[in-house]
Image: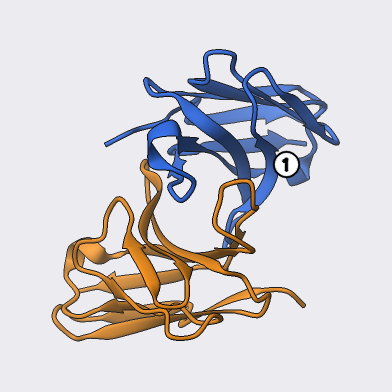
Chain colours: A blue, B orange
Amino acid sequence: GQQLNQSPQSMFIQEGEDVSMNCTSSSIFNTWLWYKQDPGEGPVLLIALYKAGELTSNGRLTAQFGITRKDSFLNISASIPSDVGIYFCAGGPASGGYNKLIFGAGTRLAVHP
Amino acid sequence: EAQVTQNPRYLITVTGKKLTVTCSQNMNHEYMSWYRQDPGLGLRQIYYSMNVEVTDKGDVPEGYKVSRKEKRNFPLILESPSPNQTSLYFCASSPRTGLNQPQHFGDGTRLSIL
C-alpha cells in the first residue's frame, strides 16, 4: 500500500534550537496534515495544508506543502520543553478520494532544558 | 466539552474472547474512524464511517467489524481477537467527510491479547 516516509525517527535537542522534520512519498497527495501526540493522549492537529506550495504557520510552527505534492516539512523554531512528543505527518492521497488518510511513522522529539 | 470518548482505556484479554471497544462523540460529527498505532508504523486506518449506516474498510480491516447505528457511536468489534491485534487503538471524528475537516481523536485504548 501507499506509504509515507517520515524522518528523522527521533531527535534530541537543546531548548531554544530549531527543529525540522519531513515526510516524503512516491505518490501524489491532495492534503498534508501535521499532528502532535503527547504521552497517553490522542494526536492533535497542528497544521493542515491543502495546496501545493502552501506555507502555513501556527505560532512557532511552520509547515509547507511541497511543490511536487509528494512531500511536506514541519519546522519548529526556538523549541521549548513542552514541544516534547511524537509528531506525525498524514496525507490524503490523490487516489484515495477524500476519505483516506495515511500516517507517517512519527518523529519522536525530546527537548533538553 | 467537545470530546471523543473511548472505553475501555486499557484491556487485557485472551485469544478468541469477543470484545467491543466503544467510541462516542458529542459534536454531532458525521465522519468517524478507527486507527491502530503500532511502534514504527504510525497510525493505520481500520474502518471509517461517513454517516449513519455507511461504513467502509480502511487499510487494515481484517479481524475487525464496526457498526454505525447512531451518529454519535462507532464501536469497534473484535469477534475473535488474536495476539497480532495487540495495539493502541484510536477513534477519531470530524464534522463532515473530507480531509479539510480536522479530526478529533480520543485518548486511545490499549489492548493486550494474550
Going 38% across and 54% down the picture, which residue do you hit? B45
Q: Is residue A74 above or below residue B104?
A: above
Q: Position of residue B33 (x, y in %)?
A: 46, 63
Chain to which the residue tagged by mark 1 belongs: A
Mark 1 residue element: helix
Please tell me which residue lies in front, A91 or B28: B28
Whether residue A61 sits left or right of residue B49 in the image: it is right
Instruction: Name the spot of residue B12 as percent of width and height, x first.
Output: 31, 79
- Residue B29 appears in which quarter of the rendering? bottom right
Q: Quadrant of the N terminus of chain A?
A: top left
- Percent across and percent down for residue A32 are 57, 34
Q: Amino acid at mark 1?
A: Asp
Judge by depth and name the residue closer to the eye, B61 or A86. B61
Question: In the drawing, does residue B83 fall left or right of residue A71?
Answer: left
Q: Residue at x 56, y 35 (%)?
A: A31
Question: Quarter-wise, where is residue B65 in the image?
Answer: bottom left
At a point 77% along the width and 23% down the height, the residue shown is A17
Q: Residue A57's quadrant in the figure?
A: top right
User: Mark 1 highlights which residue?
Assistant: A83
In the rendered image, the quadrant that contains the C terminus of chain A is top right
Q: Residue at x 43, y 47 (%)?
A: A100
Residue with the most extreme top position: A67
A107 shown above or below B108 = above
- The answer to whether residue A105 is above or below residue A77 is below
Determine crowd level at label 1: few under 14, some 14-19, many 20+ residues with C-alpha closer than 10 A. Answer: some
Total marks shown come to 1
Q: Position of residue B54 (x, y in %)?
A: 40, 70
Residue B101 or residue A102, whichever sits in front: B101
Q: Nearer the viewer, residue B33 or B81?
A: B33
Q: Is residue B50 left or right of residue B18?
A: right
